[in-house]
Amino acid sequence: MADPSYPPLSYATPFLLHARASANSFLSQFEPLALLVGPLIAVFLARALRSLIGAVQERGIKTALLGFFMSCIKLVPAVKRHIDAEKQKVVDKMQSGGKSRREGWRTMLPYPGLGSGVIDLMKEEKRSDAAWQGKCSGTVYIKGNESEGHFSLINEACSMFSHTNPLHLDVFQSVVRFESEVVAMTAALLGSKENASGGQVCGNMTSGGTESILLAMKTSRDYMKSIKGITSPEMIIPVSAHSAYDKAAQYFNIKLWRVPVNKDFQADVKAIRRHINRNTILIVGSAPGFPHGIIDPIEVCVFLGCIINNRIVKFTWLFSDVPWWVLLVIMQELGALASSYNICFHVDCCLGGFVLPFARKLGYQIPPFDFSVKGVTSISVDVHKYGLAPKGTSIVLYRNHDIRKHQFVAVTEWTGGLYVSPTVAGSRPGGLIAGAWAAMMSLGQEGYLQNTGEIMQARKKIQRGVEEIEELFVVGKPDMTIVAFGSNVLDIFEVNDAMSSKGWHLNALQRPNSIHICVTLQHVPVVDDFIKDLQESVQTVKANPGPKDGGLAPIYGAAGRMPDRGMVHELLVNYMDSTC
């Protein structure tokens, strides 16, 4: 039995002394410098190996090794100079010439002011803008021109409240009320009145869809940290999700996993599930996605039926293309996935928020996508798109106040006083909020129903027109107002350049190479013109294939074939740096 008069450590002392002597004896055969440098090299190699493994996990072994190889060869000065020169050539092409667009721009404030004459100068500058009426994919959602009709109404509303700032809520109570009502009316369109929503849906107005998404990501990160203690947050999105999520990942230090879409170009629920781990804070779905206008599987698709007298009787279904003879079909969906793992689920309705609710009322088969779906914790919706509000108005909504509280920033130790702000911006333009309120109130449900009917019919006509061109194919099955199309026999980007020469401004897409048109009220009267020009453009490219001078086809083609995506990244950064 151990003697209680001796402390326990005394029994370990001989062992420790022997271990020290053995270690000193073993290390004595090495140079002191090696003993100093060896651990440092080991730590360096361990960190490098960890980075390599992380890169392989995120980008795949081929892409990671290629990126490492390119980084190494760019260390050679001559190689780096050659690559930089080639990149500049591409940037010049992207600018449609070697001359910077900034050349000739003013860099000094004029000493004598121009007074009211500045308006004439602005009118002159405006003449250099491209003709946008009916020719741009998305971009302008209000019909007519900027000096009449609905444009005139929202411009007057913005002007009336251009001096206001909702930050000073005790002074400008009118715009504070406007914002609250815009948020509430929008929430009502997106399921806030449904019992399944919980009755606490709340939110704020923002400057656009990107800020709405940024706030939702920041809020989800902080909310999940508070309830699950997650300090190394990760989020999972389909490759079709908007690039604003990449921006949020960089801004808020959230690890981003992009997973492939399925054969229907929808979010692949199985792939998303495989990436969920203990650090996952959020998954994302779109209603619809920007590239192809397709709604992700937000809620389960169910067909119910029964057999009566040996006949199949159909009760109800959520998708029109479900085979009538199927008794029960259940597709995996994102809402249940988020709910089962107790993580956040954001739905991007920036495009669909002011179309899908009205399309459903018009009889279109629109699957559930809003707060009526269990598991949805936040939604972003742009009022400045199909809500027909002035540019710079969007909304971020949350299922309840407990989640939204993590969006706010409160400062208690500032010498300027106690400070709290709901969004990224402190001061916000009350005129835009007033313009959004005026747009919604002037149109009402009846106005939005009429607009939605016209736009959806225009989309269907354009889709049929594309399908009738044998050289083209429609990407997936569009659910809303976007028609994306590609080609297996032509360079679709050359078709895009041909359309550009006719004054059209369409969106170029990748994976698969395609282009799309986002149909707005501007396109309703010019649908036939679009189809005719598209037919002619296809025949032009078919008869004379090859890149067009000043076109973007060579650039998109080169980017698609460039295996080093890091170089494509650098091209985009250099282009932006020379443009803005």
Image: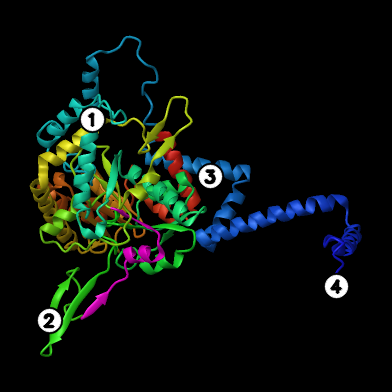
Q: Quadrant of the N terminus?
A: bottom right
Residue 468 lies, in percent from the top left, at 16, 63
Q: Mark 2 points at which residue?
A: 313
Labels 3, 1: front one: 1
Residue 333 is a magenta residue: yes
**Lower sequence index among marks 2 and 1:** 1
| Secondary structure of residue under mark 1 | helix
Which class describes the residues within 10 Å of circle 1: few (<14), some (14-19), or many (20+)?
A: some
- Asked whether the viewer can see residue 143, the reply is no
The residue segment tinted magenta is 327-348
Q: Mark 3 points at which residue?
A: 83
Residue 356 lies, in percent from the top left, at 19, 55
Q: In which quarter of the image is the C terminus?
A: top left
Mark linked to residue 68: none
Residue 337 in which image quadrant: bottom left
Q: Identity of the amino acid at label 4?
A: Met
Residue 6 lies, in percent from the top left, at 87, 62
Residue 367 in which image quadrant: bottom left
Q: Name the residue under label 1.
A: 173
Mark linked to residue 1: 4
Q: Identity of the amino acid at label 1?
A: Gln
